[in-house]
Image (spheres, rainbow, N blue to C red):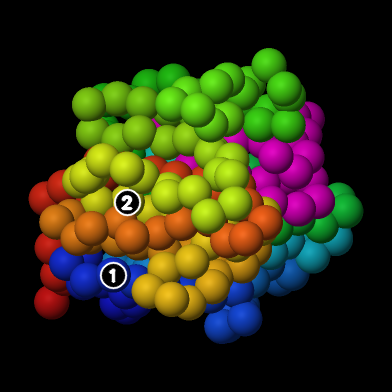
């Protein structure tokens, strides 16, 4: 299965365009944002857990990155309400579930093989944020291949003033404007390497998840 698999082109999924698809596990469905592969795929998705749903314990050979968007996600006896950012390194396993229901942003099989550490950050903790280049930033992860953070943008503020090696963003609050179009809460966008990032916050500002650097070397999947 190939969904938005040409990484040389911009890809956008606005929140009103979501198409929910059932997963193999009862009570769990997803919106496929990009995907290369069948059930075990390199993928980026919005995943929704119905109350009381769960997955059996399973392995993630290529790692897993999660941002909890709504409700509460559990891994065994560890519970992560909205705002938590998780990284489960390659070859880790877990048994995710949700008693009350949850919506999460998930990226699978996109980590470097040498990553070894679990990451757990509560992005709703004020101590996780700091001022950087005049705006509020919550750093989430950084290495030689990628940089991940949340950013709060002032009204009409440009997302990035300097060129980057591709970028991916998810609108968490407010809206952003790209190409004259407004994209609100839940909208996802991937901008390829070499393309200018002419994206700005809307009239009321925005909070976004932002990943850069990870698209270098990515091309079109046949």
Tell me the chief SS of the magenta region: strand
Q: What residue is disc 2 on?
A: 167
- Report whether 183 appears left or right of 164: right
Q: Position of residue 208 (x, y in %)?
A: 55, 48
Q: Position of residue 30 (x, y in %)?
A: 59, 70
**Which residue is at a point 38% across and 22% down the rendered structure image?**
116
**Disc 1 element:** loop
Front residue of this view, candidates 119 and 214? 214
Quarter of the rendering containing residue 15? bottom right
Q: Position of residue 11 (x, y in %)?
A: 34, 71
Q: What residue is disc 1 on?
A: 10
**Which residue is at a point 49% across and 49% down the rendered structure image?**
157
Could you tell me if residue 70 is visible in this image?
yes
Could you tell me if residue 45 is visible in this image?
no
The residue carrying pointer 1 sits among few (fewer than 14), some (14 to 19) or many (20 or more) residues within 10 Å by Cα, namely some
Front residue of this view, candidates 159 and 76? 159
- Report whether 70 appears left or right of 109: right
| Magenta part of the chain | 65-93
Q: Is residue 78 magenta?
A: yes
Q: How many marks?
A: 2
Front residue of this view, candidates 94 and 4? 4
- The quadrant of the rendering that contains the N terminus is bottom left
Front residue of this view, candidates 93 and 67? 67
**Disc 2 element:** strand
Q: Is residue 83 magenta?
A: yes
Quarter of the rendering containing residue 89? top left
> Above or below — where is 149 with respect to 19?
above
Q: Which comes sooner in the sequence, label 1 or label 2? A: 1
Q: Which mark is residue 120?
A: none
> Above or below — where is 42 with respect to 35?
above
Q: Position of residue 201 (x, y in %)?
A: 53, 56
């Amino acid at each position: 299965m190939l969904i938005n698999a040409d990484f040389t082109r911009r890809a956008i999924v606005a929140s009103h365009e979501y198409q929910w698809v059932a997963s193999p596990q009862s009570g769990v469905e997803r919106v496929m944002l990009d995907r290369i592969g069948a059930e075990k795929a390199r993928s980026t998705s919005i995943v929704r857990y119905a109350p009381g749903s769960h997955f059996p314990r399973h392995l993630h050979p290529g790692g897993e990155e999660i941002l909890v968007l709504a409700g509460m996600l559990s891994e065994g006896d560890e519970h992560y309400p909205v705002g938590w950012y998780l990284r489960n390194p390659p070859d880790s396993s877990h048994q995710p579930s949700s008693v009350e229901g949850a919506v999460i942003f998930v990226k699978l099989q996109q980590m470097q093989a040498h990553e070894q550490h679990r990451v757990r950050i509560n992005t709703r903790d004020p101590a996780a944020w700091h001022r950087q280049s005049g705006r509020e930033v919550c750093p989430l992860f950084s290495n030689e291949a990628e940089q991940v953070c949340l950013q709060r943008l002032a009204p009409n503020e440009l997302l990035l003033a300097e060129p980057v090696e591709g970028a991916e963003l998810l609108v968490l609050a407010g809206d952003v404007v790209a190409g004259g179009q407004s994209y609100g809460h839940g909208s996802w966008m991937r901008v390829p390497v070499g393309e200018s990032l002419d994206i700005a916050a809307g009239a009321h500002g925005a909070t976004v998840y932002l990943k850069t650097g990870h698209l270098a070397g990515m091309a079109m999947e046949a």
